[in-house]
Amino acid sequence: MAEIRDNATDAGRFARAVAAAVGVVFLLVGVLGFIPGVTTDYDSMTFAGHESGAELLGVFAVSVLHNIVHLLFGVGGLLAATQARFVAPFLYASAAVYGVLTVYGVVVDKASAENFVPVNSADNWLHLVLTVGMAALGWVVQQRLHGGHFDYRPRGRHHAA
């Protein structure tokens, strides 16, 4: 098993910066979800459920629960940023959660009680992008921390230049 590079290396600093950036973005989104004007129909926001008519930026369905989840992901990102070894697992776990949310958003009846998050089509697309993006970031961070490099030539066919 490859040794994980520590926080003092360029790879460690890169990993920690990625987690911090992800954390800050999620904290920002979570806070913005509670600001009237940035969140349209703010007065119709519910704790959870499809009845919440509030939309972040007038596009993404939000509720108090949805905003709290964003804040928790933000805190998780900042906590992961304290140690390089926590970053890839945080990103992979986040990708898995957003993958589940993507599938949930596609299969749940938007007007049913099961739509407790709430989600709309814009949320589904964003969750899909977050799933792929965080998994890709996790892979890049993992490669950098383990000394991996991006050599895509087939093994055994390396020719001297």
Image (spheres, rainbow, N blue to C red):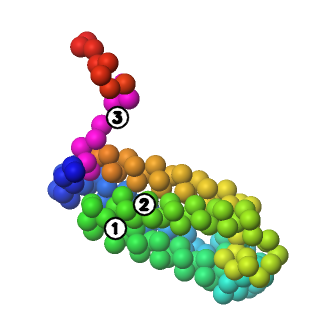
Badge 3: how crowded within 10 Å, few (<14), some, or many (20+)? few
The answer to whether the residues at label 3 and label 1 have Cβ atoms under 8 Å apart is: no
Of residues 10 and 5, the one nearer the viewer is 5
The residue range painted magenta reads 145-153
For this view, does 122 lie left or right of residue 10? right
Disc 3 designates what residue?
Answer: 150
Question: Where on the picture, by quarter, is residue 57?
Answer: bottom right
Viewer can see residue 11: no
Spatial CA distance of label 3 from label 1 is 24 Å
For this view, does 44 lie left or right of residue 5? right
Q: Residue furthest right?
A: 111
Q: Residue at x 56, y 64 (%)?
A: 98
Quick one: SS at disc 1? helix
Name the kind of residue labelled 3 in the image: Phe
The answer to whether the residues at label 1 and label 2 have Cβ atoms under 8 Å apart is: yes
Disc 1 designates what residue?
Answer: 80
Q: Position of residue 71 (x, y in %)?
A: 49, 76
Q: Residue at x 30, y 59 (%)?
A: 16
Disc 2 designates what residue?
Answer: 91
Of residues 69 and 53, the one nearer the viewer is 69
